[in-house]
Image (spheres, grey):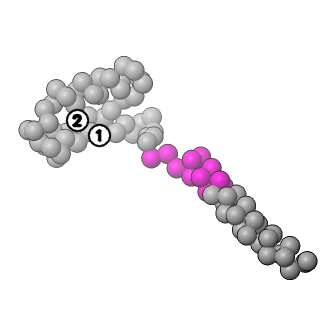
């Protein structure tokens, strides 16, 4: 009977350990890595890599949206990178 108990308990412990490990990793990455944020004195620079195909007016409208709605600031817009 003890062997059957071990055979049943081993996969259950493995799955619980896998689940707990995933939760720990996801929690750590969500609290440490913030690729979408930048410092107060280091605003992002927007580079238009499409060239003339993507007009400056579209970029300015998008930037205005983020400045008005979210309070974000940008460094400058580079049209010819």
The quadrant where residue 24 appears: bottom right
Look at the image and tell me whether residue 16 can be seen: yes
**Mark 1 nearby-residue class (10 Å; few <14, some 14–19, many ≥20):** few
Q: Is residue 2 magenta?
A: no
**Where in the figure is residue 29, as x and y percent of width and height?**
57, 52
The quadrant the N terminus occupies is bottom right
- Identify the disc placed on residue 77: 2
**Left or right of residue 56, residue 10 in this image:** right
Circle 2/circle 1 CB separation < 8 Å: yes
> Which residue is located at x 39 percent, y 39 percent?
42
Looking at this view, name the residue that lies furthest to the bottom. Answer: 3
Q: Earlier in the sequence, mark 2 or mark 1?
A: 1
Residue placed most toward the observer, 56 or 17: 17
> Alpha carbon of mark 2 to alpha carbon of mark 1: how far?
6 Å
**Where in the figure is residue 17, as x and y percent of width and height?**
72, 63
Residue 63, above or below 12? above
**Where in the figure is residue 38, as x and y percent of width and height?**
44, 40
Look at the image and tell me whether residue 17 can be seen: no
The quadrant where residue 11 appears: bottom right
Element assignment for label 1: loop
Residue 10, above or below 21? below
> Which residue is located at x 59 percent, y 46 percent?
31
**Mark 2 nearby-residue class (10 Å; few <14, some 14–19, many ≥20):** some
> Which residue is located at x 16 percent, y 26 percent?
57
Residue placed most toward the observer, 37 or 27: 27
- Identify the disc placed on residue 3: none
Q: Which residue is mark 1?
A: 45
Magenta residues (range): 23-35
**Left or right of residue 81, residue 7 in this image:** right
Main SS, magenta region, reads: helix
Element assignment for label 2: strand
**Left or right of residue 23, residue 2 in this image:** right
């Amino acid at each position: 009977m003890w062997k059957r108990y071990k055979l049943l308990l081993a996969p259950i412990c493995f799955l619980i350990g896998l689940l707990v490990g995933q939760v720990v990793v996801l929690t750590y990455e969500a609290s440490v890595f913030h690729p979408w944020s930048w410092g107060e004195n280091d605003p992002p620079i927007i580079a238009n890599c499409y060239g003339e195909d993507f007009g400056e007016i579209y970029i300015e409208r998008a930037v205005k949206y983020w400045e008005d709605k979210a309070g974000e600031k940008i460094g400058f817009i580079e049209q010819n990178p």
